[in-house]
Amino acid sequence: MTVAGSGIKEGVVFRWIRWLAEHQPTARAARGQPTVTSASPPGDAASMSHEVGPDVHTLSTGGDPVTASLDEEEPVQSESFVSLFHLVNSLVPDEQNVLAVRPGTSIREALDVMRVHGFSQLPLMEGDLVLGVFSYRSFANRAITLGRIDLDRAEVDDFIEDLEFVRVTDELERTFQYLDRDGVVLIGDPDRLIAVATPTDLIDYLYGLTRPFMLIQEIELVLRRLVNATVSEGELSQYIQRAISSNYRDREDQIPTELGELSFAELVQTVVNSANFSAAFHRILGNNRESAWGYLGRISSIRNDVFHFRRPITDDDVQVLIDARTWLRRKARAAEARGGAR
């Protein structure tokens, strides 16, 4: 969950969110276990409140801990047709526990709970019914009116505010105005609270969707720029011919001759070709051709899976992209420090 008043300019944040929602392709990131590969270079012929888990106990607030979770009668089915759409339920994890306080809880106790868990608000609940939300904002607004407050005697009941509810089947965009205005939105109904979502929860979700696209964009554009800075057009045409001509048997007239005509796979193949690497590309990527292939070898396959939505992208895939992007950034910075690669 996000602490309100984090210094993020909300208007800018939500313009960015809207741009992502309108311009980025939809793709879901899936959890996966890292795997280790040992491929060799190709041969010359080719904040939400779910942060509180079941093991975290609430402070004593005049009753048993209050939690809310997804109703078992309405499971989120990851293989359903509807699950392919990015709705509000996309913000709700499978295991959702909402930390809340009961009526009669002192202001000090509630503030302590929020401080310990890093929350900016707590729902006030009587049984399954949400009576309102105690937040730093609602406390401050009421405190200004009252003037002096005894934190041990004052109760949260008199310092709550009403916040908006959205349903899990609503469009994500419905949360934007509420998150922009209040910094939080409640998911579910007044008598069935499922989750508490903040702007950071939404940003994290959308960033998780778009991150593979942005990483691939950076990797491909930087690698093309480095190649262009290393060899002339005439040299590059020869290097391309040497590296990928075997891919065009019986259609030699279709062999690319310019950088912009190369697919990403062909670009990597051209760069890590043994003769090409020794002649030119070691100047920008270092002397270890196997290391260069280790960073770049899997990118083309992941790129195709990302842009064609062939399978869920795993954490391991994202880490491969991050590693390649970080490696290329170092090479790019070094090339700039030398004043160019040629």
Image: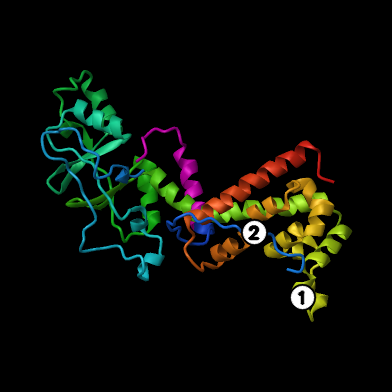
Q: Residues within 10 Å of mark 2 (few under 14, many from 20)?
A: many
Tell me: 246 left or right of 194: right
Please determine whether, in this image, residue 322 is positioned above or below residue 301: above
- Indicate yes or no whether the magenta region holds residue 182: no
Q: Nearer the viewer, residue 212 or 296?
A: 296
Give the residues drawn in magenta, as a range. 1-21
Tell me: 255 left or right of 2: right
Q: Nearer the viewer, residue 172 or 212?
A: 212
* Mark 2 residue element: loop
Q: Amino acid at mark 2?
A: Gly
Q: Amino acid at mark 1?
A: Tyr
Q: Percent position (x, y) of residue 197?
A: 33, 46
From this viewpoint, which residue is outermost toward the right?
A: 234
Query: Which image quarter holds the N terminus?
Result: top left
Q: Percent position (x, y) of residue 317?
A: 53, 56
Q: How many marks?
A: 2
Colour basis: rainbow
Residue drawn at point x = 64 percent, y = 54 percent: 294
Residue drawn at point x = 41 percent, y = 66 percent: 84
- Indicate yes or no whether the magenta region holds residue 11: yes
